[in-house]
Image (spheres, helix red, strand yellow):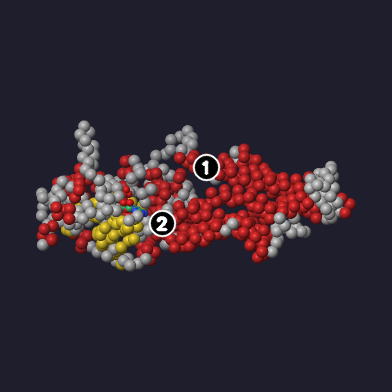
Amino acid sequence: MTTRRSALLRQPMAITAACMLGVLVVLAVLAPVLWGGQAAAANPDAITLPSSAEHLLGTDKLGRDVLLRTLVATRLSLVMAVAATAIGACAGLLLGALPAVLGARAQRWFAGVIGTWLAFPVLLIAMLTVILLGTGATTAVVALALTMAPSFARLAQTLSSRVGGSEYLAAARMLGVSRRRQFTRYVLPNIAEPVIVNVTTSIGGGLLALSSLSFLGVGVQPPDFDWGRLLSEGFGEVYNSPVAAIGPGVAVVFAGLAFSMLGESLAAHLRHREHGKALPPRRLGPAPVAARPVETPSATPKESTEEGVDTVVPLLEVDGLSVSFPGPDGWITPVQDVSFRIAPGEIVGVVGESGSGKSVTVMSVAQLAPAGAAVTARRLRFDGEDLTGLTPAAAGKVLGTRVGVVFQDSLTALNPALRVGAQLAEVPRVHGNAGRRQAREMSVRALDDVRIPDAEHRAQQFPHEFSGGMRQRALIAMSQIGSPSLIIADEPTTALDVTVQRRVLALLRRGCAESGTAAIVVSHDVAVLAELCGRILVMYAGRIVEDVDCALLATPERLAHPYTRALTASLPDLGTDRTRQLVTIPGEPPDLSRPVPGCAFAARCAFATDRCRTETPVLAPHRHLGRVACWHPQDATAPDTAPGREEVEA
Ligand SMILES: Nc1ncnc2c1ncn2[C@@H]1O[C@H](COP(=O)(O)OP(=O)(O)OP(=O)(O)O)[C@@H](O)[C@H]1O
């Protein structure tokens, strides 16, 4: 913070603005005390005198020194401008940013109010205020605040809409963080900087506007005086003593410039900092102490078999989950009739090509479906509780800390304005009713558990001060801190290099094994899932096409669905012959906005028949103890341990 401040104070414009503001503040404090009496007292012997050594700016109609009056007017002029801007900014912030935590309907209503308010001409609002409240300093402040509020509201609305759609706010909502806390700790800090820049510049504009109102006679009334009032009086005597109007005019310009320059300097500083973040300056110094090596857990979680899933009461039971989005020509359903179960402590992977519906599926289960999504399910049970038919908010309350979420992009999943430790502490504070100190200790312990070196110090840092791998580990710590029964991880390692990826996966696996937590892990990468999971769900065009034990991935000939086979065959490994072209899956996934009858993979499948192109295969138990949705499963060599498709259908 000190470094940031000193960087700002190295800018010439910022230094000039700070000096100018310093002069104004000193005058605002001292001038009324030193010269207040003289500036107000009439002197019949010195009426409308021109500029002289005794009266540099001459005197007014009552013989008062114009320079002293100008200096004394600094306090009222500044106080009015700051007050009007502060009121306008606060009202605007509430109107524009509050809806981000109130939901979509409130956002629509507030957007309507802001739009209508903005449509009113500024002058009309000012005139209406004067008509209703009469002339005077208070009226001028209220009028200005009323004209400023909608533009602040529009700014806050635009900025907060980004925060409103962020993953870190979604996670906070899911945790049950109160709306007041969401607003003060998540929304406001993330929109504060541009708003502060705007407020600073607006004070300059506000000074001009207030001076204009007083100049026109509807602002400050005698015996009070501000710069606008003095300007008006000076103009009345412009032919006798032209300098009388110059003093207040210069003061208005001087103060307006000071605030505008400060706003510009702040804005330039913020822009510079944003660019600087991408490539932080590095200092040469001793090599950092190496992080503690990650221990590979000695015991991997016990893998559940499909039999196990059936006999153990499932932790999560999803039946017939569909998710639709409004499209230009009607609803598009990228997730269709998805059903699966997860046993306590089981780690299940979800794999598929981009756009196959993996993220939407798991996020819908966590009640974090994207805005506008219509989510339906025949059954959605978690830990014995039926979530079907509950509103997302009510279901979110049930899930609370019992589900931890690890998002794909750790940078957007962590609140950039909150220290990492404070974010982790949110979980025990909100749900465990832990005190501030206890929650802090828990957050440091959680960071230490995921092998973040010097956790005590790191907990005090902001997310941008962490590396990608560290942020991802912090997210895992956050998902585990509330001792959830289920962790939902959406591509937790996609953005990481292979070494860090392995460490993060090891942490996730160890965390689940130690606490008996179940997990659903989404990935493009079958190899990643094979290392971590007991079972994988293979998705294609919004449906599960195969639900298979990971052990079978080592023997592709035992995989049933042609798509799963193609997916595993297209994976390169260290033994892959580099002189030969990699296996790819021919064709493209179907366009979900134009659904075709039959199996969605038929157009790319070498085994497709007419039946595949007309009838949609259902996901049914298969002989390899998993489930498959295919009319021609390919695992002919697999031992016949479950009823085959034909038998099931019979
Ligand atoms: N907010 C949204 N509005 C409209 N359609 C959406 C929205 N979010 C996702 N979709 C659609 O849902 C489909 C599935 O998206 P999803 O993110 O689940 O795919 P994915 O399999 O996770 O892909 P990736 O691996 O690339 O993240 C996509 O076709 C996408 O266009």
> Would residue 297 be found to the left or right of residue 13 on screen?
left
Q: Earlier in the sequence, mark 1 or mark 2?
A: 2
Q: Secondary structure at mark 1?
A: helix
Residue 102: image location, x then y, percent? 46, 62
Residue 504: image location, x then y, percent? 34, 46
Look at mark 2 in the image and give the residue it sits on. 170
Q: Residue at x 47, y 38 (%)?
A: 280
Residue 321: image location, x then y, percent? 28, 60
- Taking 458 as reference, is 311 above or below it? below
What amino acid type should be assigned to the residue bearing mark 1? Arg
Circles 1 and 2: CB distance less than 8 Å?
Answer: no
Q: Secondary structure at mark 2?
A: helix
Q: In which quadrant is the C terminus drawn?
A: bottom left
Who is closer to the viewer here, 530 or 566?
566
Tell me the crowding category of disc 1: few under 14, some 14 to 19, or many 20 or more residues within 10 angstroms, Cα based.
Answer: few
Which quarter of the figure has residue 360?
bottom left
Q: Residue at x 87, y 50 (%)?
A: 46
Q: Residue at x 46, y 61 (%)?
A: 108
Q: Residue at x 45, y 47 (%)?
A: 463
> Would residue 325 be found to the left or right of residue 626 on screen?
right
Q: Going by the picture, which residue comes out furthest to the top?
A: 579
* Residue 531 visible in rendering: no
Who is closer to the viewer here, 219 or 239?
239
* Residue 157 visible in rendering: yes
Cα–Cα span, label 1 and label 2 = 27 Å
Which quarter of the figure has residue 331?
bottom left
Who is closer to the viewer here, 180 or 498?
180
Look at mark 1 in the image and give the residue it sits on. 271
